Image (cartoon, helix red, strand yellow):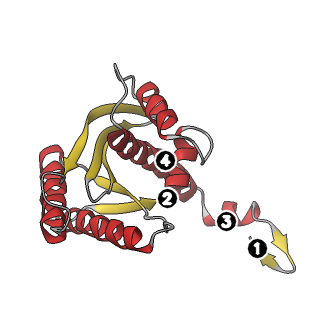
Amino acid sequence: MATRILGIDPGLRTTGFGVVECEGSRLHYIASGTVRTDALPNGDLPGRLKIIFEGVREVAARYQPDCAAVEIVFVNVNPQSTLLLGQARGAALAALVSGDLAVAEYTALQMKKAIVGHGHARKEQVQAMVARLLSLPGEPSRDAADALGLAVCHAHAGASQAAIAAVSPLARRAHAQYRKGRSY
């Protein structure tokens, strides 16, 4: 059975979204794009958050994902920017959970490592690898590529988690490392 995953790359001006379907180890591109708030004046934070909330909710309603993956906000050198980004992320999360979606969270480092192979990849590298992994005719926008990368990252993580869960507790214990009487 195929699992549809919605990736969200939150941003106050541009929130990226990407939808992929995972069937076994095969990934299929469904859609991607952005929710843009730049038509509003800079000082209208509540208006921007409303657009993000409604936009993410609309995307979730249109594509009917089974779960979602959202980027975790990193601490920026500018604390004000970090707080604003956190509010945009909160609006996106609220939209997802209001639709009863399970939400997984990944750092940009985790997503880049899963997609490109190292956590300090540039945006262009993520765009190119996402296009390659999903057999896209061209590269998606930066925000959409990050969102698609989060969805792909979650597809890979979900498969790993299912494989771990399938192993019996006794078998997991047999392969655990022991140090000073504790298993790791």
Which of 62 and 53 lies nearest the eye of the viewer? 53
Which of 55 and 5 lies nearest the eye of the viewer? 55
Q: Earlier in the sequence, mark 2 or mark 3?
A: 2
Q: Which mark, residue 170?
A: 3
Q: CA distance from mark 3 to mark 4?
A: 21 Å
Q: Secondary structure at mark 2?
A: loop
Q: CA distance from mark 2 to mark 4?
A: 18 Å
Classed neighbour count for the residue bearing mark 2: other residues with Cα under 10 Å, few (<14), some (14–19), many (≥20): some
Q: CA distance from mark 2 to mark 1?
A: 28 Å
Classed neighbour count for the residue bearing mark 3: other residues with Cα under 10 Å, few (<14), some (14–19), many (≥20): few
Q: Position of residue 63 (x, y in %)?
A: 18, 44
Q: CA distance from mark 2 to mark 3?
A: 32 Å
Residue name at image x 51 percent, y 67 percent: 77
Q: Earlier in the sequence, mark 2 or mark 4?
A: 2
Q: Amino acid at mark 1?
A: Ser
Residue under numbered circle 1: 183
Q: Earlier in the sequence, mark 4 or mark 1?
A: 4
Q: Position of residue 118 (x, y in %)?
A: 63, 43
Q: Secondary structure at mark 3?
A: helix
Residue under numbered circle 2: 107
Judged by depth in the image, the label closer to the viewer, 3 or 1, is 1
The reply to whether dot 4 and dot 1 touch (C-beta < 8 Å) is: no
